[in-house]
Image (tube, rainbow, N blue to C red):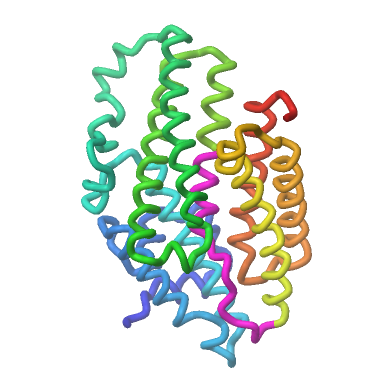
């Protein structure tokens, strides 16, 4: 495979601020076209990860670790951008049966936006509940099929299920974001923002690696062990919130809160103790999700069960 020149260019320029990189640069770094399917992006990411992994570059471990960090950041940025972009792609055209593609429900044209007026709160609340229940159903299926285990998700049938779940979450995310443009009610806006933030960070977290592929670098191994503890707590929090409570018939908020809070603490400590590990990107993403989950629990579940 031809190595994208952008990889070397970014590694050499250590003053580059990843946060300001245009999305086009992230696509180039991964050596994929903007119209590539999600599966093609995943495949390109895996190829680059194999080539730049520190184990494949024992004579320049620091360089390889730096390269992997930027590749991980690019992958996260591209997939996050796709989730937040309300555009249907060819590979998503048949993601779900009997569902209207996101593009067909996309943002109204400029002249139509001018006609938008504030909608009654009861109507918006009902629509929000519909989007929320759809998202919760998708999150239930995520845990029902144990798709947080990457080897299970990589099976062909399960990967198709995961893709449908992501498609459904995107629909809910953008549907709720549109509702936010129809009201100035601060309470509604807060609920819309907290729920969509949770969905977005859940998705980002779901794309993170959680299986170590090498024990050669002791620094990375220790960082991974801490990361894995936090990831297990985060998974248990989500499982209680989106799966177990529905099967049990009652919600154990204390369980979800304890796991989410412990995960937040673990990820924060991991970034402080191992800031230069190859797991730093995943740790930061998981930390954001843990925090979003805690805010969601606090706002949507006022009674302790």
Please identify the residue farthest to the bottom as the structure is shown.
Answer: 59
Q: Residue at x 40, y 71 (%)?
A: 6
Q: How many marks?
A: 0
Q: Nearer the viewer, residue 207 or 55?
A: 207
Q: Position of residue 270 (x, y in %)?
A: 74, 62
- State whether residue 80 is above or below residue 108: below
Q: Residue at x 40, y 53 (%)?
A: 162
Residue range of the region highlighted in magenta in the rendering: 198-217
Q: Nearer the viewer, residue 208 or 32?
A: 208
Left or right: where 253 falls relative to 59? right
Please identify the residue farthest to the top as the structure is shown.
Answer: 120
Q: Position of residue 289 (x, y in %)?
A: 61, 46
Q: Residue at x 30, y 28 (%)?
A: 107
Q: Does residue 1 appear in this view?
A: yes
Q: Does residue 177 appear in this view?
A: no
Location of residue 218 by image quarter: bottom right
Q: Magenta stretch: residue 212 in it?
A: yes
Left or right: where 285 falls relative to 78? right
Image quarter where the N terminus lies is bottom left
Q: Nearer the viewer, residue 121 or 79?
A: 121
Q: Nearer the viewer, residue 20 or 37?
A: 37
Left or right: where 202 falls relative to 26? right
């Amino acid at each position: 495979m031809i190595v994208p020149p952008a990889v070397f260019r970014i590694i050499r320029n250590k003053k580059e601020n990843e946060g300001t990189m245009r999305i086009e640069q992230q696509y180039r770094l991964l050596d994929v076209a903007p119209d590539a399917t999600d599966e093609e992006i995943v495949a390109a990411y895996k190829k680059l990860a194999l080539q730049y992994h520190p184990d494949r570059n024992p004579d320049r471990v620091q360089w390889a670790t730096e390269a992997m960090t930027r590749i991980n950041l690019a992958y996260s940025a591209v997939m996050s951008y796709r989730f937040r972009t309300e555009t249907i792609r060819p590979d998503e055209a048949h993601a779900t049966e009997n569902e209207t593609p996101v593009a067909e429900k996309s943002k109204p044209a400029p002249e139509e936006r001018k006609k938008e007026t504030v909608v009654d709160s009861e109507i918006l609340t009902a629509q929000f509940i519909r989007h929320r229940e759809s998202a919760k159903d998708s999150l239930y299926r995520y845990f029902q099929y144990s798709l947080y285990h990457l080897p299970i998700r990589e099976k062909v049938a399960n990967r198709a299920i995961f893709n449908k779940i992501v498609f459904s979450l995107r629909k809910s995310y953008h549907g709720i974001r549109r509702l936010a443009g129809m009201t100035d009610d601060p309470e509604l806006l807060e609920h819309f923002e907290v729920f969509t933030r949770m969905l977005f960070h859940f998705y980002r977290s779901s794309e993170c690696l959680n299986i170590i592929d090498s024990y050669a670098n002791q620094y990375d191994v220790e960082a991974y062990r801490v990361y894995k503890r936090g990831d297990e707590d985060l998974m248990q929090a989500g499982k209680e919130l989106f799966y177990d409570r529905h099967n049990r018939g009652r919600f154990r908020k204390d369980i979800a809160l304890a796991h989410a809070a412990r995960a937040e603490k673990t990820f924060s400590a991991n970034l402080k103790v191992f800031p230069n590990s190859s797991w730093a990107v995943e740790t930061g993403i998981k930390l954001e999700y843990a925090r979003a989950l805690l805010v969601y629990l606090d706002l949507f579940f006022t009674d302790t069960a």
